[in-house]
Every structure is written in structure tokens, then in C-alpha cells.
């Protein structure tokens, strides 16, 4: 089984709708078996783009938090002084602000009474979704919660298990935006990274940063230039940068109002408007993705 991750460095460049379109095209007429992992745990929406419903959910502990046993606490306040995250407040006795606690354990180390323990807390869910023949594993972090990298790790693990159970040819991961811990967790173990960008200076800067991360992991990558006709000068700057940095341009997709129209109706552009310019470009691109499965 191959593992491909779709990343963008920034949100809003069409990563999830592309992932969904590739999934649809690759599984047409039972060609390939596919499992999708939605690792954008702060804003999971792949199932919405696919128009699918959750069929199972499981709460997960992706974070650790400090807890005080007040029967043991002598109110020395050493923990308050030691917490670098200012997650302990109080004057008479210490109070932990759970949402900002990083679970680092320093307070437990300095506590002379061994009154503090670090415990796993449920702060997210893993949802299981079926859309046609495609199985989707999607993580969702609780509001205000941290440690999304750990949740992404859990989602990837569950998705690999689902993929092996259903004999998938491909595990396709819809990655989170940015270049932080969740992106690294989504990347780990992938055979190939598809990087989606658009022709703007800020998107190019984000692309350059994500390329550094991907190359740091020694993972092969190629780029899709979405909405390529937004600005020809910026598009050419992106193409030139890719050529200078020996990064393959997998394909380009024109801006096409059919695509948001289809999304507004809860459908995919390749379904609703199969002959629209963007759909034709996406169909061509899915052949490139198919080539990566060989
Ligand atoms: S575990 Fe770390 S962040 Fe949380 S309260 Fe203790 S010292 Fe502060
Ligand atoms: S360090 Fe331990 S004993 Fe001291 S205030 Fe904190 S919890 Fe209480």
C-alpha cells in the first residue's frame, strides 16, 4: 500500500476538495481501494466535502494535564513559580488552568509533597466515515484544546489499521495547514507529498517553508498549482522557483466558478460539472496520482 499526503502550507487553497476529487476518481468502477485520513483536526471537513455521515466515533486522549491532590498539597506555591506556561494561579492555594496546561510535568517534579500527577485527558475524537467504497478516518480536536500533533498521530495509526483491514491500495491523507507538529505527524511514513499552492507571493512563501519540511524528512514531493490563472506573473514566479529547486510541477488547475458552485451544493465539481475546465484538469491530475501508485 502507498501513502500519499496532500499538504499546502496554508489553508484555503483547495486541498480538501482536491483530496475528495482524487478519492472519487481513483475509486471509480472499483479501480482502487482507498482509505482517507483527515488530519486537519482543527477544522476537519473532508467528510462534508464528500457528503458523508459519521458512522462511529471514539473519544481519544491526545493530551496530558496536571492535577493537584489537595489532600497532599501544603500550599508552598513552588509549582506556581515553576510553571513556564503560567498555567498555575492562586494566592492561598494553587489552581491549574487546564486549557493552557501543556502537561510538561515540571510542577510535578518540583512539588515537595508529590501532590501533582500528570494524567491523560480526552480532548478529541476520531470519527469513522463511509462514503461509497471509501473509508474515511477523521480527527477532531476539542475546542480550545492543544496537542493536535498527537491527535494526528492517532488518526494516522487508525487510518493505517482501517486501510490494512479493507485491503486499500492507497492511504490518502488530507494534511493540516502550516508547518508545525501536526504537519510532521501527517507526513511521517508517507511515500509522497503532493503540495498544493496558488499563484500569490504569500502562497509561494508558504510553499517554500513546507518544501523545507518535506525535504527534511527525505520524502519525494510534487506541486499542484491551483487557480493558475489568478495572476500570470505570480504563476510564472512559482513555476520558475519550482524549476530552480528541481520540484516537479504535477499539473495546474484554472480558477473555475463551477467548483465553488458545486461545493455550495455539497457536491464535487468533477461530479456536477464533469466537463468544466477545472474538472478536466483534475481528471488529468488524478492520472498523475495514479502513476504514483505503480
Ligand atoms: S504540567 Fe507544565 S504546563 Fe501544566 S501546570 Fe504543570 S508546569 Fe504548568
Ligand atoms: S508544589 Fe505541591 S505542595 Fe506546593 S503548592 Fe504546588 S501542589 Fe501544593
Image: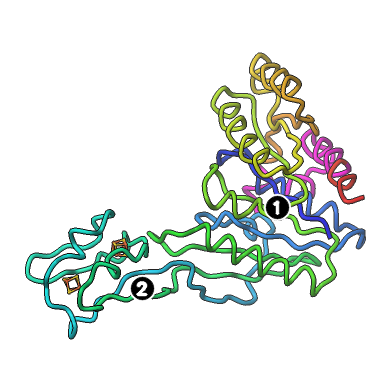
- The picture places residue 276, in percent across and down from the top left corner, at 80, 36
Q: What is the number of the mark on residue 267?
A: 1
Is residue 159 a member of the stretch shown in magenta? no
Give 66 or 79, whichever is nearer the viewer.
79
Under circle 1, the secondary element is loop
Q: What is the secondary structure assignment of the residue under circle 2?
A: strand
Give the mark nearer the N terminus: 1 vs 2.
Answer: 2
Q: CA distance from mark 1 to mark 2?
A: 45 Å
Rendering quarter of residue 102: bottom left
Q: Is residue 9 above or below residue 64?
A: above
Q: Position of residue 29 (x, y in %)?
A: 92, 60
Circle 2 is placed at which residue position? 118
- In front: label 1 or label 2: 2
Q: Which residues are magenta?
A: 260-287
Colouring style: rainbow
Q: Nearer the viewer, residue 143 or 55?
A: 143
Between 116 and 196, the one lying in front of the other is: 116
How many C-alpha atoms fall within 10 Å of the one at disc 1: few (<14), some, or many (≥20)? Answer: many
In the rendered image, residue 7, in percent from the top left (x then y), is placed at 65, 44
Q: How many numbered marks are there?
A: 2
Name the residue rendered at 57%, 32% in the picture.
206
Ligand 1 shows up in the quarter that is: bottom left
Image location (x, y in percent) of residue 262: 69, 46
The answer to whether the beta carbon of the residue marked 2 is less than 8 Å from any atom of ligand 1 is: yes
Q: Name the main secondary structure of what is drawn in magenta.
A: helix
Residue 27 falls in image quadrant = bottom right
Answer yes or no: do the residues labelled 1 and 2 have beta carbons within 8 Å? no
- Specify the farthest residue to the bottom: 71
Amino acid at each position: 500500500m502507498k501513502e500519499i499526503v496532500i499538504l499546502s502550507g496554508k489553508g484555503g487553497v483547495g486541498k480538501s476538495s482536491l483530496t475528495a476529487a482524487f478519492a472519487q476518481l481513483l475509486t471509480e468502477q472499483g479501480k482502487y481501494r482507498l482509505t482517507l485520513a483527515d488530519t486537519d483536526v482543527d477544522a476537519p471537513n473532508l467528510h462534508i466535502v464528500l457528503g458523508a455521515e459519521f458512522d462511529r466515533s471514539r473519544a481519544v486522549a491526545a493530551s496530558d494535564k496536571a492535577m493537584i491532590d489537595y489532600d497532599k498539597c501544603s500550599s508552598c506555591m513552588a509549582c506556581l513559580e515553576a510553571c513556564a506556561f503560567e498555567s498555575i494561579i492562586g494566592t492561598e492555594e494553587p489552581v491549574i488552568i487546564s486549557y493552557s496546561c501543556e502537561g510538561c510535568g515540571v510542577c510535578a517534579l518540583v512539588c515537595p509533597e508529590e501532590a501533582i500527577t500528570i494524567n491523560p485527558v480526552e480532548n478529541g475524537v476520531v470519527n469513522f466515515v463511509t462514503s461509497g467504497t471509501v473509508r474515511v478516518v477523521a480527527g477532531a480536536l476539542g475546542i480550545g484544546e492543544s496537542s493536535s500533533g498527537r491527535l494526528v498521530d492517532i488518526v494516522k495509526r487508525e487510518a493505517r489499521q482501517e486501510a490494512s483491514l479493507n485491503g486499500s491500495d492507497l492511504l490518502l491523507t488530507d494534511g493540516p495547514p502550516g508547518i508545525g507538529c501536526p504537519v510532521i505527524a501527517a507526513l511521517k511514513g508517507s511515500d509522497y507529498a503532493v503540495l498544493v499552492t496558488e499563484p500569490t507571493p504569500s502562497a509561494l512563501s508558504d510553499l517554500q517553508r513546507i518544501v523545507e519540511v518535506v525535504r527534511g524528512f527525505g520524502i519525494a514531493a510534487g506541486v499542484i498549482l491551483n487557480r493558475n490563472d489568478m495572476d500570470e506573473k505570480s504563476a510564472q514566479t512559482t513555476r520558475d522557483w519550482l524549476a530552480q529547486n528541481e520540484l516537479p510541477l504535477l499539473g495546474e488547475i484554472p480558477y473555475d466558478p463551477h467548483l465553488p458552485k458545486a461545493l455550495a451544493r455539497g457536491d464535487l465539481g468533477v461530479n456536477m460539472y464533469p466537463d468544466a475546465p477545472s474538472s478536466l484538469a483534475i481528471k488529468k491530475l488524478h492520472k498523475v496520482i495514479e502513476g504514483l501508485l505503480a
